[in-house]
Image (tube, rainbow, N blue to C red):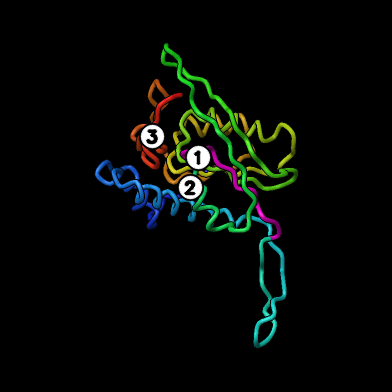
Amino acid sequence: MVVNLSQDYSILCDWIAEIRDQSVQTDRMRFRRNLERIGEIAGYEISRLLPFEEKEVQTPLGIANSKILRAQPVLATILRAGLPLHQGLLNVFDKADNAFISAYRKHKRDGSFEISMSYVTSPELENRIIIISDPMLATGSSMVKTIQLLRTESNPAEFHVVTAIACTVGIEYLRRALPSCKIWCGAIDDELTAKGYIVPGLGDAGDLSFGSKIQL
């Protein structure tokens, strides 16, 4: 299952346009907030597919028959770029447990790269719904490696992947490796450069959110 949240117009399309726009990207707070709002929309749409149960709620004037989420999901994100998108999901699922994974491209002199993972913290994942976010799904390598790592010592019920901009190459790679994953995209682009960057994309989401970095 792949959902393009901007396939039909909604206000989310305006936020996608802003995070792509060079003239707006210089405002880091606005960039982060737009990613957060994209996460909120994705969280709302995902919630419509999650298991719920009936509950009687006592109001000051009587009993209300209500529907509530049956179990809280686990919200996972890939550091550091995923933090604003993760915050948007956390605004929706405000009682959720959280997991954080450090996964990044370690570039080699020949221009190629490998995915390096140096930090993981996670609650118990057995039979739980995992919603994992990263603003860019380019080659899909880091997302696949991250999910495979989370599955090594537990058996989650299902995975939802949330991304602001995805490339068709990354989507297909993820679907081949993990066909049961549900993928939620703010927008989908078709081109990927030889160095693994999405075109037109938006650039480096981590740098735009938090400033440029050096490799230590």
Which mark, residue 201? none
Describe residue 87's horizontal placement relative to residue 129 as left or right.
Answer: left
Residue occupied by mark 3: 204
Task: Evaluate if marks 1 and 2 touch, with contact meaning CB atoms under 8 Å apart.
Answer: yes
Q: Which residues are magenta?
A: 70-81
Q: Earlier in the sequence, mark 3 or mark 2?
A: 2
Label 1 residue SS: loop
Q: Secondary structure at mark 3?
A: loop
Q: Earlier in the sequence, mark 1 or mark 3?
A: 1
Depth check: give the residue in front, 116 or 199.
116
Q: Earlier in the sequence, mark 1 or mark 2?
A: 2
Category of crowding for the residue at label 1, using alpha-carbon neighbours closer than 10 angstroms: few (below 14), some (14–19), many (at least 20): many
Task: Answer few, some or many: residues within 10 Å of disc 2's Cα (few below 14, many 20 plus, some between 14 and 19).
Answer: many
C-alpha distance separating marks 3 and 2: 14 Å
Q: Nearer the viewer, residue 25 or 43?
A: 25
What residue is drawn where x is 69% and y is 76%? 57
Per the model, the C-alpha gap separating discs 1 and 3 is: 12 Å
Quarter in which the N terminus is drawn: top right
Q: Could you classify mark 3 by the number of other residues whose Cα lies within 10 Å: few (under 14), some (14-19), or many (20 or more)?
A: some
Residue denoted by label 2: 85
Pinpoint residue 88: horizontal percent, then vertical percent.
49, 53
Report the amino acid beneath label 1. Asp
Q: Which residue is mark 1?
A: 134
- Closer to the camera, 153 or 6? 153
Q: Circles 3 and 2: CB distance less than 8 Å?
A: no
Q: Disc 2 marks which amino acid?
A: Leu
Residue 91 against residue 3 in the figure, above or below: below
